[in-house]
Image (spheres, rainbow, N blue to C red):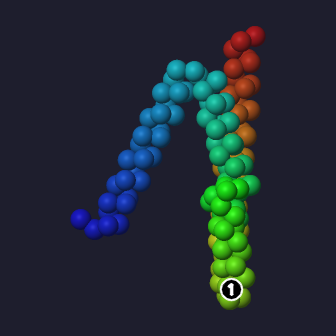
């Protein structure tokens, strides 16, 4: 098997597992589950948006941040433009999924409140 086929199979399996978990949550908690999934999606997108340029590490490892800054300074203008384009595309995708999370949260909250009252 080719590596690309294995990667696609693993990705499909991951999506299958995620969709089954989402189905179980929605089937168990109805509108509250939809709101919960939306809230989780909203949280993950907001975290990714806040940490888009941050180095993976903590306050205990300032060398990571320094090395990332130095690498960014050594980039050529073409590399900077490519990096900026990649970040722009990622931000558009995150904005879409963040708005989807907000919508799911509102739908879940409205449906939950409607059936509670």
Q: Is residue 3 left or right of residue 51?
A: left
Residue occupying the point 70% across, 79% down? 70
For disc 1, the neighbor class at 10 Å (few under 14, some 14 to 19, many from 20) is: few
Q: Is residue 19 above or below residue 90?
A: above
Q: Where residue 112 sits: x, y (%)?
A: 69, 20
**The one of 114 and 39 positioned closer to us in this rendering:** 39
Q: Residue lying furthest left in this view? A: 1
Q: Quadrant of residue 74?
A: bottom right
Instruction: Tally the marks.
Output: 1
**The one of 60 and 41 positioned closer to us in this rendering:** 60
Q: Secondary structure at mark 1?
A: loop
Q: Is residue 84 visible?
A: no
Q: Is residue 31 left or right of residue 10?
A: right
Would you name the residue on which mark 1 appears? 74
Q: Is residue 22 above or below residue 98?
A: above
Q: Is residue 114 visible?
A: yes
**The one of 104 and 50 positioned closer to us in this rendering:** 50
Q: Where residue 60 sits: x, y (%)?
A: 67, 56
The N terminus sits in image quarter? bottom left
Residue occupying the point 52% across, 20% down? 28
């Amino acid at each position: 098997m080719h590596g690309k086929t294995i990667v696609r199979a693993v990705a499909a399996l991951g999506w299958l597992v995620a969709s089954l978990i989402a189905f179980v949550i929605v089937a168990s908690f109805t509108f509250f589950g939809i709101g919960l999934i939306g809230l989780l999606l909203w949280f993950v997108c907001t975290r990714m948006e806040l940490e888009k340029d941050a180095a993976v590490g903590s306050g205990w490892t300032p060398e990571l941040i320094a090395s990332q800054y130095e690498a960014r300074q050594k980039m050529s203008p073409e590399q900077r433009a490519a990096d900026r384009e990649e970040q722009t595309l990622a931000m558009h995708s995150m904005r879409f999924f963040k708005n989807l999370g907000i919508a799911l949260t509102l739908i879940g909250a409205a449906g939950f409140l409607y059936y509670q009252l």
